[in-house]
Image: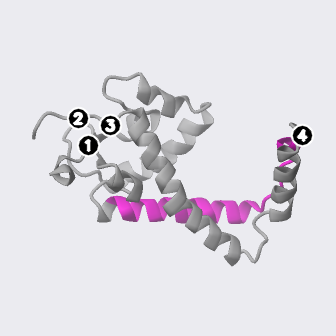
Amino acid sequence: MNEVRYAGFWVRFVASFLDTLFLALPVAIVIYFLSDGNWFDFSQYQQNIKMAMSGNINALNDLPKTDKTWEIINLIVTITVTMIFWKRFKGATPGKKFVHVKIVDAKTFEEINNIQAITRSFGYIVSTLAFLIGFIMVAFRKDKRGLHDLLAGTVVVYDEDSLN
C-alpha cells in the first residue's frame, strides 16, 4: 500500500454534510410520511423557525414533541442504509465517495467488517453526546481519528483508487 493519507476534519465535514442531504434527509422524509405525520409536529418546527427569523432567541427552546418509536425506527433505518453503502462502496457513503475518502480498518487498512460498521454507527451517537468532541478531535489528531473511529478500530483515508 502507498503512503496512507488520512482524511482531515474539513473533508470529513463536507462528506457528512452531503450524506445528511442525500442519505439521512431522504430517509427521514420517508419515515415521516410512513408515520403519517405522527413522528413529530412539523407545524411546531415551522412556528419556531418563524419566531427565530423574527429575532426571538427563545424560539428554539420549545422543541416539538416526538414519538420515540418513530425516532428509533429512523435511527435504525439510517444506520442500516449507511451500512449498506459502506458494504456496497467499500467503506464509503455517497458523501465520502464524492470527496474520495473511505473508512478502513485502522491496523490493516482493509475493508471494515460488520462489527466495526455497527460500532462506528453507534459511536456517532457517543461522539455527538460528548458535546461533539468525538468529531472535533479529528482536527487535532495526527491520524485524524474521531472517538467513533477509536471505538470501532477504523480510520478515514483518501481513496487513492478513486483519485486515479
Image-based side of 61 in relation to 114, left or right = right
Q: Is the residue under label 2 in contact with that under label 1 (CB below 8 Å)?
A: yes
Which secondary structure type mostly characterizes the magenta part of the structure? helix
Q: Residue 10, position in %: x, y?
A: 43, 36
Q: Is residue 41 visible?
A: no
Q: Using the image, tell me which numbered label, if any, was put on residue 7.
A: 3
Quarter of the rendering occupied by the N terminus: top left
Q: Residue 116, position in %: x, y?
A: 36, 48
Comparing marks 4 and 2, which lies closer to the viewer? 4
Which residue in the protein does label 4 denote?
56
Rendered position, 31 above or below 137: below
Q: Is the residue under label 3 in contact with that under label 1 (CB below 8 Å)?
A: yes
Q: Using the image, tell me which numbered label, if any, was put on residue 23.
A: none
Q: Residue furthest left?
A: 1
Q: Secondary structure at mark 3?
A: loop
* The stretch drawn in magenta includes residue 67: yes
Q: Residue 136, position in %: x, y?
A: 50, 29
Q: Secondary structure at mark 4?
A: loop
Which residue in the protein does label 1 denote?
158
